[in-house]
Image (spheres, rainbow, N blue to C red):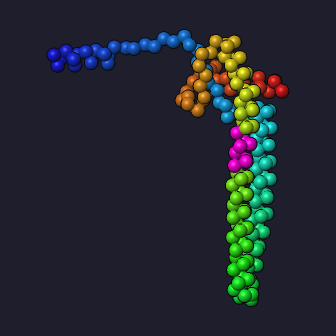
Amino acid sequence: MKTLKTFIIILYLLYPCYSYSEDKVAFINLDKVIKNSTQGKELINKIEKLDKKNLSSLEQKQSEIKKFEDEINSKRNIVSKEETLKDIEKLKNQIKLFNDEKNKMVTDLNIFKKTELDKIMKKINPIIQSYMEKNSIEILLDSKYIYIGSANSDLTQIIIEKLNNTN
């Protein structure tokens, strides 16, 4: 009985299994589509401008806080202890406001990125779906998860061109 089970297992392992599929599979690099399409480049520029504006504003406020901190330290021995404590409390409040504002800017930027990416994806998806229907493609994968594939199966450049032509 034991030899029969072993024989069946060996036969199963040695038996060649062929998979024949007529489903057409393709892949796409969505990051590249966004980075190289006209609309994607505009989106990236908007995000970078907003980010630079936020950073500039934060750097200015940070330098003001640093300046105030240096001012407190320079007159620490000259003014009364009560006044120094008041200034330190003011500084703490400024730092707290700065951190709150920084967190709000980060949150707002992330929300902006998400909504803008959603908008561009709403433009890309119908183009992809239309192309898939016309070319009888059953499955479309993200190229991040493809180890190797035929260049004929890569739809990235085709979708970039179609997206650029929809302006």
Point out residue 96 in the picture as x, y percentages from the top left corner: 69, 64
Q: Position of residue 114 (x, y in %)?
A: 70, 39
Vertical placement of 43 versus 60: above or below? Answer: above
* Residue 68 location (% of width, % of height): 76, 74
Q: Quadrant of the C terminus?
A: top right
In the image, which residues are magenta? 107-114
Q: Is residue 35 visible?
A: no
Left or right for 125, reference 16: right
- 49 is higher (above) or lower (below) than 83: above
Q: Residue at x 71, y 33 (%)?
A: 118
The residue lying at 80 percent from left, 32 percent from top is 38
Name the residue furthest left: 1
Query: Front-most of 146 and 118?
Result: 118
Nearer to the camera, 34 or 70: 70
Residue at 67% in and 34% down: 31
Magenta part mainly helix, strand or loop?
helix
Q: Residue at x 32, y 18 (%)?
A: 13
Q: How many marks?
A: 0
Residue 47 at least partly seen: yes
Query: Where, by quadrant of the figure, is residue 66 drawn?
Result: bottom right
